[in-house]
Structures are given as C-alpha cells and as structure tokens.
Image (cartoon, grey):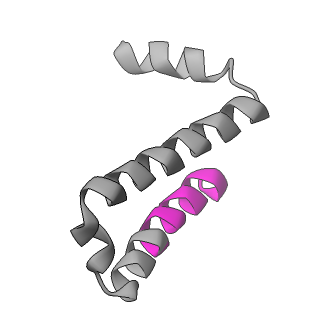
Amino acid sequence: MWFKSINDRLKKLNCFDYTVVKLCVFTFTLILVKFWPDLVSLDWYWYALVFAVTYGYLIARVFGK
C-alpha cells in the first residue's frame, strides 16, 4: 500500500538526511511564527504539553513492543 512505499523510501535515509529534515521543520516553524505571531503568544505550559505528548509517543514507539 501507500505507507509501505513511504517506509521503503525512508529506509534509504541516513543520519545526515534526518538532520536535514529536522532543519527543514525548524525553518518551517520559524516561517509560521513570522506570519502568525499569535502562535507564540501561548503560555509556556502549552508548549511543554505538546512536547511531552510527542516525546512520550516517540519513546513508546522506539522502546515499545
């Protein structure tokens, strides 16, 4: 299916490629903040909550069954 094709392509990536993906996401986030300043007007704990949920998900995927 479609996801299998994507997974096969992701297996070809190396550490440098993942670093480039992170840089692209970071840059896109800066662009969002530039054009949507209300995004950074949230209280700090909302960002901490989003981080905790996404980090917990990743840890569960990496170390889970």
- Within the image, what quadrant is residue 36 found in? bottom left
The image quadrant where one finds the N terminus is top left
Seen in the picture, residue 63 relative to 53 is either above or below; the reply is above
Furthest-right residue in this view: 15
Q: Which of 30 and 45 is in front in this view?
A: 30
Q: In this view, does 49 lie to the left or right of 21?
A: left
Q: Magenta includes 42?
A: no
Q: Where is residue 58 in the image (x, y as percent from the top left)?
A: 55, 57
Seen in the picture, residue 61 relative to 4 is either above or below; the reply is below
Q: Position of residue 21 (x, y in %)?
A: 58, 36
Task: Please give the name of the residue rendered at 38% of the width and 49% of the height, measured from the top-left corner.
Answer: 31
Task: Please give the name of the residue rendered at 60% of the width and 61% of the height, measured from the top-left corner.
Answer: 59
Q: Give the range drawn in magenta.
A: 52-64
Q: How many labels were placed on the picture? A: 0
Q: Is residue 6 left or right of residue 16?
A: left
Assign the magenta stretch its main secondary structure. Answer: helix
Q: Magenta includes 61?
A: yes
Q: Where is residue 44 in the image (x, y as percent from the top left)?
A: 40, 86
Q: In this view, does 22 lie to the left or right of 27?
A: right
Task: Please give the name of the residue rendered at 40% of the width and 76% of the height, measured from the top-left corner.
Answer: 47
Seen in the picture, residue 64 relative to 5 is either above or below; the reply is below
Q: Where is residue 65 in the image (x, y as percent from the top left)?
A: 59, 51
- Within the image, what quadrant is residue 34 found in? bottom left
Furthest-front residue in this view: 34
- Within the image, what quadrant is residue 33 found in? bottom left
